[in-house]
Image: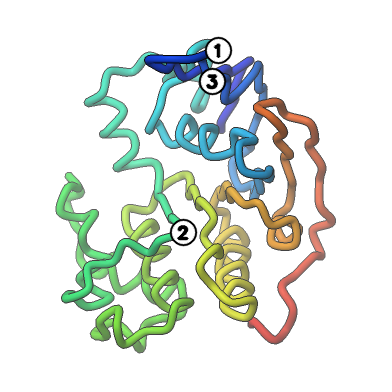
Amino acid sequence: MIELKQISKTYKRPTGEPVVALSDVSLHIDRGEFVAIVGASGSGKSTLMNILGLLDVPTSGQYLWDGADVTSLDPNRQAEMRNKKIGFVFQAFHLLPRTTALENVELPLLYSDRRSIKDLSRRALDAVNLADRIHHRPSELSGGQQQRVAIARALVNEPDLLLADEPTGNLDRTSALEIISVFQTLNGTGRTIVLITHDREIASFAGRIVSLERGYRVGDDTVVRTTRVPQEAQ
């Protein structure tokens, strides 16, 4: 589904030397894969996520999506593609505090041109096991439940790709494993997921681990598919 060809990204600074965030990174992601991108702070993983999510453009290289070059799409086409094809989950939940779980999940649909949006939000919450919390506000939910609402919001437009940037960073271990279990279940239904994390234990629950270091891809390893979240988080 996705192919990056020698992607590089350099940020210019008003003073001082330019910052090279990515150097000649090539990567393919097949439809239905669960890929973890791992690296320490400054390794380039967030820059790579921004490029994958069409939030930033590479300095050089090509980004192909289903064989079509999306590297030089104009801003309007990029925004349209993000809305229809990509769902984002971040470390911070970014939920509106005065609205219910259902209303938070419905927000992306306000910008959708779908002919029918009936029950999409309820189905998305059901997919993350929160059908019984649809009328709860964020303050009435645990951290893990709030992140599941954020995942449901990312899913509501039925995107082809789910991008998760450090989605367990604000959670305790039990809640973190709960979230990874949700991702594994979604991937089991065919959803393509790219997880950005510095935590190799969390990454080990994906099907594949891509390692970055100082802007270079230094590893690409398949994980045994029987790896599952411990029963305590199911």
Label 1 – label 2 distance at C-alpha: 28 Å
Label 2 – label 3 distance at C-alpha: 24 Å
What residue appears at the point 56 percent right and 33 percent down from the top-left corner? 1
From the image, tell me which residue sits under label 1. 61
From the image, tell me which residue sits under label 3. 19
Q: Are marks 1 and 2 in contact (CB under 8 Å)?
A: no
Q: How many marks?
A: 3
- Which residue type carries mark 3? Val
Above or below, comparing residue 72 to residue 170 in the picture = above
Q: Nearer the viewer, mark 1 or mark 2?
A: 2
Q: Looking at the image, which is closer to me, 185 or 171?
A: 171
* Left or right of residue 127: residue 199: right
Mark nearer the N terminus (1 vs 2): 1
Mark nearer the N terminus (1 vs 3): 3
Rendered-image quadrant of the C terminus: bottom right
Residue 189, position in %: x, y?
A: 57, 61
Q: Are marks 2 and 3 in contact (CB under 8 Å)?
A: no
Residue 195, position in %: x, y?
A: 58, 50
Above or below, comparing residue 57 to residue 116 in the picture = above
What residue appears at the point 22 percent right and 64 percent down from the top-left corner? 106
Tell me the number on the disc at residue 91: 2
Q: Nearer the viewer, mark 2 or mark 3?
A: 3
What residue appears at the point 20 percent right and 59 percent down from the top-left corner? 107
Q: Looking at the image, which is closer to me, 60 or 123?
A: 60
* Left or right of residue 79: residue 186: right
What residue appears at the point 37 percent right and 64 percent down from the top-left corner? 93
Quadrant for residue 117, please give it: bottom left
* Left or right of residue 52: residue 230: right
- Which residue type carries mark 2? Gln
Residue 209, position in %: x, y?
A: 74, 45
